Image (cartoon, rainbow, N blue to C red):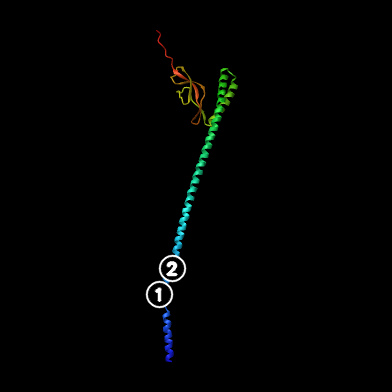
Amino acid sequence: MSKEKKTKAEEVEKEEPLDQPAADVSAETSAQAEEADIPAEEAAQEDVELIEEEKEEEEPLRLQLMRLQADFDNFRKRQVRERAEWIVRANEDLFMELLPVLDHYEMGLKSAEEHQTDCSVTEGFKLVYNQLLDLLEKHNVTPVEAIGEAFNPHIHEALTHMPSDKPAETVIEQVRRGYRLGDKLLRAAQVVVSSGPVEEKDSE
């Protein structure tokens, strides 16, 4: 019996070294955890780098989009401005062709009054004439003031100077009416300008 007990005791002693100390097990677990954290950190770093690369690629596209938007906005504004200018030029050409017709109408009315034409006829023509003036005014075409005004070379065209009882450089007669389109002069008024009163010489 003593030999059997001895043999069992030896077997137990041989099995005991198989168990590792708790400290060794903890150290080994920590090492494994650190080894597991390293790939995770590397993966996170790779994600950050990938995001930065995507941002760098998106930045030129964003700038390009902003330039395209700015170019389109400028193009749209230019189109609106050019269209408005085209309409103004087209209207200006039309009014310039219409003004001589209006001149002849005025001369006809003046001649009818001088020859004492029937008042009913004259009044009818005046009615049509006033309608034409109203139409022009509706489109911002207005006559240039002339008679009694000081001569202005920017809006008046002097055909001649004549002595009169009016101060010198005063418009005393209008030969052809002038017109403006808004602030722009369509046609200068043709006028006769006073050269001042006639100087009387003392008789000797």
Residue 107: image location, x then y, percent: 56, 21
Q: CA distance from mark 1 to mark 2?
A: 17 Å
Residue 21: image location, x then y, percent: 40, 77
Horizontal placement of 122 versus 43: left or right? right
Q: Which quarter of the image is occupied by the C terminus?
A: top left
Instruction: Give the residue at x 43% y 84%.
Output: 12
Q: Which amino acid type is marked by label 1?
A: Asp
User: Mark 1 packing: few (<14 Cα in 10 Å), some, or many (20+)?
Assistant: few
Q: Secondary structure at mark 1?
A: helix
**Which residue is tagged 2?**
35
Horizontal placement of 10 versus 133: left or right? left
Q: Secondary structure at mark 2?
A: helix
Residue 39 lies, with reference to residue 190, above or below; the image says: below
Which residue sits furthest bottom? 1
**Which residue is tagged 1?**
24
Mark number displayed over residue 115: none
Q: Nearer the viewer, residue 147 or 180?
A: 180
Instruction: Give the residue at x 50% y 24%.
Output: 189
Q: Nearer the viewer, residue 110 or 75?
A: 75
Q: Which mark is first along the chain, 2 or 1?
A: 1
Instruction: Give the residue at x 45% y 58%.
Output: 49
Residue 88 lies, with reference to residue 151, above or below; the image says: below
Residue 120 lies, with reference to residue 52, above or below; the image says: above
Residue 54: image location, x then y, percent: 48, 55
Q: Which amino acid type is marked by label 2?
A: Glu
